[in-house]
Image (cartoon, grey):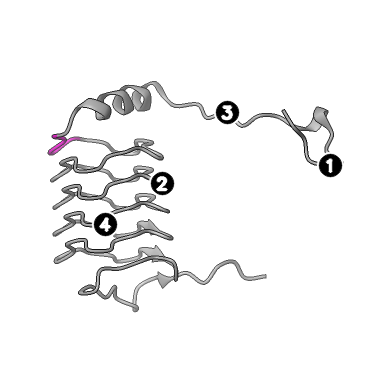
Amino acid sequence: MKLAPGANREHCSPVVIVWRKKDRRIRAELVTVTDLTRRDLRRCRLVGMDLRGKNFADANLDGADLTEADLRGADLSRANLHVAFLTGTRLDGANLRDACLDGAYLIATEFRGARMDGVTTKGAVWDQATVWPDDFRPPMSDVGLWHGRRN
């Protein structure tokens, strides 16, 4: 392992991601399964997964971690994404009709071309890097735009 100049090998430790047994099982299943209609995926860690074109209609993804996942073209209609982590997630062309994004983290999330009629975003947090579809304007009266940490 190459260290930065001045770094001490004794103080460097590798980052290890430990997946729960439930997450490992679901991640392995998602590689082959395309129809996840009405699945209970609450609090699952699906970080960085390729989920393009999968059907999550009516699925419960409450509190799920979908950070940097690729959901382009996926069907998330009526899905519960309450307080889900969608930071850096690609949802280009996804169907989010009537989905719940209340309290979700939408930092640097891409919704370009997504279908978002009926979506709720109460208490959701996004930033200037979040890309919305041309026909969708998130309500600014809720939590809304995150401007970064303040000192």
Looking at the image, is 49 positioned above or below residue 21? below
Task: Give whichever of discs 1 and 4 has the lower sequence position.
Answer: 1
Which badge, 4 or 2, comes first in the chain's sequence?
Answer: 2
Question: Which secondary structure lies at badge 2?
Answer: loop
Image location (x, y in percent) of residue 105: 40, 57
Of mark 4 and mark 3, the one earlier in the sequence is 3
Residue that badge 1 annotates: 5
Query: For the residue marked with disc 3, what is the amino acid?
Result: Val
Q: Is residue 44 above or below residue 62?
A: above
Which amino acid type is shown beneath numbered disc 4?
A: Asp
Inter-mark Cα distance, 2 to 1? 31 Å
Mark 3 → mark 2, Cα distance in angstroms:
17 Å
Name the secondary structure under disc 4: loop
The mark lying in front, picked from 4 and 3, is 4
Q: Indicate the secondary structure of the residue bearing disc 3.
A: loop
Residue 34: x and y in percent read 16, 33
Placement of 28 over or under 82, stated as above or below: above
Percent x, y of residue 39: 18, 35
Residue 106, percent across and down?
38, 59
- Label 4, on which residue? 92
| Label 1: which secondary element | loop
For the residue carrying disc 1, how many other residues have a C-alpha within 10 Å: few (<14), some (14-19), or many (20+)? few
Callout 2 environment at 10 Å: few (<14), some (14 to 19), or many (20+)? many
Highlighted range, magenta: 35-39
Q: Which residue is mark 3?
A: 16
Q: Amino acid at mark 1?
A: Pro
Amino acid tagged 2:
Thr
Rounded to the nearest angstrom, the CA distance separating label 4 from label 2 is 15 Å
